[in-house]
């Protein structure tokens, strides 16, 4: 009986560790220390609208953390199409006005930096209309140079990246004030020495709203693993 109870206790510990894994998305800071809704000031073309911080709890340690992929989906509140304010690809109304950065954390103060101050190599992709005419997906991939892998322990909330939105061409590109919603759809953390950690479940809150947008998940769509190809190219 004692062996059975010991095994049961061990299983509970494993289950608890697994349940601790999760995602957070917040304005201005990490997790519950940040905001889930903000109102955009649409009366200027200058400055930054807001930084949206993605953070996570890991379920297991990583001996050689090397790379991360983050997917943030936006439901832009358009009617019949993507509002010009969210059209940020090259040649569009607000080209490069939204960007994802994995640079060591300088904004959020309530959680630790996943990258531990290490510089990383980054690529970002923007996909429009993937999950409806008013949907846009931002995919960011970052990798630490080979030989600089770091050990990560679970337990603390870790800052991963931020999505920064600036005000370029706000006065000429319609749609700034439309209610919009964002969801941190997935984080994919790579360790060359062990299976990757794929995190898709929320911790406190992984959905936020802009200008009255519902802070709820706007029809998230699972991502494919094709982004790992970009990680491998960075990691060489």
Image: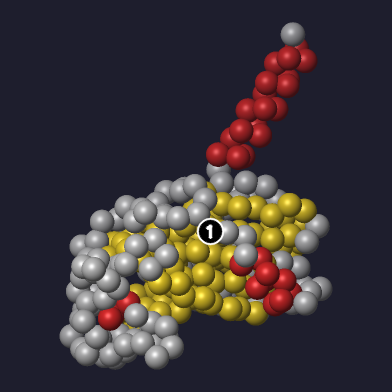
Count of marks overlaid on the render: 1
On the image, which quarter does residue 53 sit in?
bottom left
Q: Nearer the viewer, residue 100 or 30?
A: 100
User: In this rendering, does residue 52 appear at all?
Assistant: no
For image coordinates 35% across by 66% down, the residue present is: 135
Tell me where residue 34 sits by quadrant: bottom left
Which colouring convention does the figure follow? secondary structure
Question: Is 228 placed above or below 193 here?
Answer: below
Q: Position of residue 32 (x, y in %)?
A: 39, 54
Q: Quadrant of the N terminus?
A: top right
Neighbour tally class for label 1: few under 14, some 14-19, many 20 plus, Cα within 10 Å: some
- Give x and y (percent) for residue 41: 21, 78
Q: Nearer the viewer, residue 5 or 141?
A: 141
| Residue highlighted by disc 1 | 223
Residue 219 screen position, x and y as percent: 37, 54
Q: Secondary structure at mark 1?
A: loop
Q: Residue at x 52, y 50 (%)?
A: 200
């Amino acid at each position: 009986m004692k062996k059975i109870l010991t095994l049961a206790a061990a299983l509970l510990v494993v289950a608890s560790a697994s349940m601790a894994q999760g995602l957070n998305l917040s304005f201005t800071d990490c997790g519950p220390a940040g905001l889930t809704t903000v109102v955009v000031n649409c009366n200027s073309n200058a400055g930054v609208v807001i930084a949206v911080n993605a953070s996570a709890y890991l379920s297991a340690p990583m001996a050689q953390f090397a790379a991360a992929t983050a997917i943030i989906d936006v439901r832009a509140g358009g009617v019949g199409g993507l509002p010009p304010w969210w059209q940020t690809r090259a040649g569009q109304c607000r080209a490069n006005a939204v960007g994802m950065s994995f640079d060591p954390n300088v904004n959020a103060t309530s959680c630790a930096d996943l990258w531990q101050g290490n510089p990383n190599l980054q690529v970002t992709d923007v996909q429009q209309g993937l999950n409806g005419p008013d949907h846009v997906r931002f995919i960011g991939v970052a990798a630490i140079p080979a030989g600089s892998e770091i050990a990560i322990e679970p337990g603390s909330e870790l800052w991963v990246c931020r999505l920064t939105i600036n005000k370029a061409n706000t006065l000429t590109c319609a749609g700034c004030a439309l209610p919009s919603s964002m969801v941190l759809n997935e984080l994919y953390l790579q360790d060359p020495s062990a299976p990757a950690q794929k995190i898709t479940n929320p911790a406190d809150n992984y959905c936020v709203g802009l200008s009255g947008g519902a802070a709820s998940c706007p029809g998230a769509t699972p991502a494919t693993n094709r982004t790992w190809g970009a990680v491998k190219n960075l990691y060489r």
